[in-house]
Amino acid sequence: MAEGGSGPVDWRQGKDVLQCNKYMLENGTGADVTLVVGKSKKAIKAHRSKALYDKLSTSSSAELQIPDVEPDIMDVLLKSMYYNMNKVTQVQASAVLAASLRYNLYDLAATSSEMVKDSITHDNVFSILAISYTNTNRTIKEKALEFIYKNSQRCFGSEHFKNLPMKCVEDLLKSDKINLKAERIYESVMNWAEAECLRQGRTPDVANKKTVCGAEILKAIRFVEMDAAYFMQNISRSGLLSPAEEIDIIHVILDPSKRQPQVTETSTASTSAATSSPPGDTEHQTSAKAIEMEEGPAAGTFTRSLSANMGSSAVEMESGDQPRSMMAISGAGAEKTLPPRSVIPGGPSPRPQGAHPVPHDVHLGVGRNGGQKIEIQRFKGVLSGKAYMRDNHDGISFISNRKIKLHGIYVYGSHQVRGKYNITIKILEDKVAPNDANIVLQKATPIKVVTKEIDTDGVTKQYLVEVNPPQVLKADILYTLDMLMKGPVSFYGRSGQDFVLDDDSGVMLSFAQYELALGGTNVEIGQLPGMVIEDIDF
């Protein structure tokens, strides 16, 4: 107020610089530019001072269009610019991070990046991954990749995958942690390529898709793992690959030994000793084998590049007339191998893959709600020769589209000889936000532990570990079976499915890689072949 008690009050009186800036922003005092932001084109009054406006534009126009930043995000940016308030909600975190990096608001970026690491969802994971490449933020990148590896099926099928920068797509495809069929990966890449053509103003035909993909992305698609009929129908003669490349790939599809490592024995050990001795008995363990890459006459440069990126956890090959198998398990320390397997004469046939009524040889009580119990089997075939060493855990993650009860878990039994197994299975659940299942508050929380000792006969392939009382599993939540199994060499499954659907009930289980499963089990191969469940989502 002026001296003598008359005159207007000076709004700056008693305020420091930041408080003055806050007043100017909230009241539009002295504003000389209008920001038109977001799809709604909301008008926000701002100021052309060097410290503030120059972060947004060097234009001298009295109106600045910013259509790609929504009003609530711009509000956060302006508060940070004007008076250093860096307050961000979980929902805003990824959008604020992208915008704050764009406008060099590093304090705000630091605040939002910490929140982003704990708020990754299927809807924002690819945006966050792209941000990490722009800002070379290693921590955020690792968090985003971890989420994608764990949720490969849903992430690669997302519309947001189409918006990734080329480098992100290339790096993802080169990873050996993406647990998807080669056909599904190819389809996702082609959807991305179509979107990239449109972004570049190109017609999305095969020639332009090939151009935008580039040689590295095409090499990273695991064509050699595709079904022969699928490859011939969808890719062969389409122009995506050269005739020479197609011939190379077809040779490998029809004869997988051309892409498999060649096993050379450096020492010998008794197969029977290996199968009957526990993993910890190193005196009788089968010796490690040196691995060399086979380069057959039909396996050209393109095919060998594809094979190098496969990251398969198990391979089969011929050595003379005797079929063998080897499972390379990635983890701390050197590669670990399975002993040779032999053809299994006679014995019960494996349970068929898919969803079926519980067979007569499985004895469980009737469900409380009278629901039909369903047997889920995720493998198409069975091999033998899986060893259990160094207390490595096997595991598989899955999501059900309906609320179910888990009554039992199948495990594979011993091969050729009688055996005893000590089994501990933890059922893990991702804890999510009450109002948003996409926001994971805590990963892999144990909700039940099942322990069992089983005696096996060397012939029966699967044994049921009963979950008593049955465990209720919610719909659309990621669950994991984490198993520590100690005992002799066993059977194991191959040709695993990404999902199994029961047509009668509509229950569908989608499977995903469990990153802590160092025992070799994944979507494609390994232990934990099936479950007995009950649909209770009435």
Image (cartoon, helix red, strand yellow):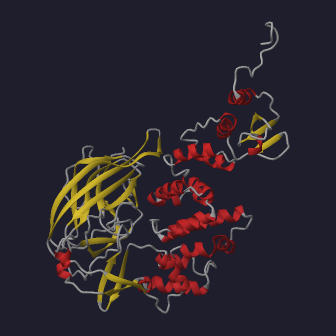
Q: Quadrant of the C terminus?
A: top left
Percent across and percent down for residue 237 are: 61, 81
- Front residue of 407/421: it is 421
The quarter of the displayed image where residue 368 is located: top left
Q: How many numbered marks have been drawn onto this rendered protein structure? A: 0
Q: Residue at x 53, y 86 (%)?
A: 248
172 lies left or right of 284: right
Task: Say which quadrant the N terminus sits in.
Answer: top right
- Above or below, 211 against 151 in this view is below
In the rendered image of this protein, does residue 164 appear above or below residue 4? below
Front residue (pair 237, 299):
299
| In the image, farthest residue toward the front | 3
Q: Is residue 109 left or right of residue 119?
A: right
Work out whether 175 lies above or below 373: below
| Whole-percent x, y for residue 318 in the image | 34, 87
Query: In the image, 171: left or right of 450?
Result: right
In the figure, 85 relative to 380: above or below?
above
The answer to whether residue 185 is seen in the rendering is: yes
Query: Which residue occupies the foreground of this view, 317 or 536?
Result: 317
**What residue is shown at x 61% (from left), y 42% (from top)?**
108
Residue 514, image quadrant = bottom left
Residue at figure coordinates x 52%, y 83% from the top left:
303
Residue 191 seen by the camera: no
Instruction: Estimate the x, y position of residue 507 in percent, counting from the top left.
Output: 38, 54
Q: Nearer the viewer, residue 181 or 107?
A: 107
Q: Point out residue 417 in the picture as x, y percentages from the top left corner.
A: 15, 75
